[in-house]
Image (cartoon, rainbow, N blue to C red):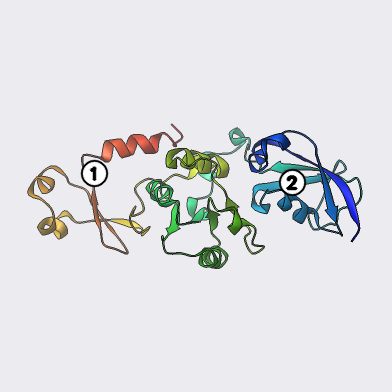
Amino acid sequence: MTSKYIYIRLFADLNYFVPVKLKNRNIRLIVFGRPSIKDVIESIGVPHTEFEMVTLNGQPTETNKNVKENDQLVVYPHFFQLSIDQLEIDDLPANQGFKFVLDVHLGKLAAMLRLLGFDSEYNNMLEDDEIIDIACNENRIILSRDLGIFKNSRVKQGYFPRSQDPKIQLKEVVDRYGLNYHIKPFSRCIKCNGELYEIDKESVKSEILENTNLYYKEFYSCSICRKTYWKGSHYQQMLEFVQNYSLN
C-alpha cells in the first residue's frame, strides 16, 4: 500500500486532543492509501464534531476529499464569536433550537442545563447507540466525555467538555453554543426535563408543609413527573447561579 507524508496544523483548543509534543505545531504525518481529510484528522484524535473549517494548501476545502503527498491541512474549531451588537436581542431565536442529549457521566451538567431552561435528555442507563439514535431522531446535540461516540459517522453535532467540573462544563457549553441569549430559567424540571407550568396554590395545599403554604405564593408543576416547585430557601442561590450566565 502506497504511503505518503502530509502536514496538519490544529488551531486553538483543538490541540486539547493531541499529545503535548504535537500541540501548536505542524504535525508531519505518514498516511497509507487514499484516506479522506476527515479520516486523517480523526486519526490523530480530533472528532469531526469539533472542527468547523479545514483549509487544504491554503484554500477552504470539503473534508471528503482524499489527501495527496505533501498536502498541508489547517484545521479550525467552531466559530461562535459573532458580532452580537449588529443584532436586535428581541429578534434572536428562542432556545428550542438548542436541544441536548448527555451521556451517563454528565448528570450534573444535564441538571444545570435544565435549570437554565434547555431541553436536555439524560438517562444514566443509555448506551452510546441509544444516545446517537436520540440525537439523530430528535435533532439533539450530543454532550459526552467519551471520544468514541464522536467517531460514529452518524453523529452530526456534538461537544466534548474539556473539564471534569460540572460548573466549568456548563460554562464551556454556554460559550460554545452562544447560549447566553437563550436562557429561560426555571422553565424545566431539573429531575426529568419536563416543562413547568404555574398551578393554583390551592391545588397543592394538602401536599406541602404548613410553613411552605404560609410563606410562598407561586407554585409550579412538572408536566411529566408532576413534581411541585416553589421559590423556596434555595431560590436566591439558584437565581444567582443562573445570573452568572445571563445577559446581566
| Front residue (pair 21, 98) | 21
Dot 2 or dot 1: first in sequence order is: 2
Q: At 25% from the left edge and 40% from the top edge, which residue is drawn?
A: 234
- Depth order, front residue of 88/238: 238
Mark number displayed over residue 53? 2
Q: Secondary structure at mark 2?
A: strand
Which quadrant: the N terminus? bottom right
Nearest the camera: 73 or 117? 73
**10 to the left or right of 94:** right
The residues tagged by marks 2 and 1 sit, at their Cα atoms, a distance apart of 45 Å
- Residue 215, position as x, y percentages in the image: 13, 42
Mark 1 element type = loop
Vertical placement of residue 135 versus 71, above or below: below
The x, y position of residue 174, in whole percent, is 51, 42
Quickly name the residue at label 1: 231
Inspect the image, locate mark 2, and give the three-letter code of the amino acid beneath it.
Met
Left or right of 102: which side holds 7? right
Amino acid carrying label 1: it is Lys
Q: Nearer the viewer, mark 2 or mark 1?
A: 2
Q: Quadrant of residue 220?
A: bottom left
Q: Residue at x 35, y 59 (%)?
A: 192
Q: Residue at x 46, y 64 (%)?
A: 126
Q: What residue is rendered at 47% in x and 38% in y?
A: 168
Could you say where residue 122 lies in the image, as x and y percent from the top left? Answer: 43, 58
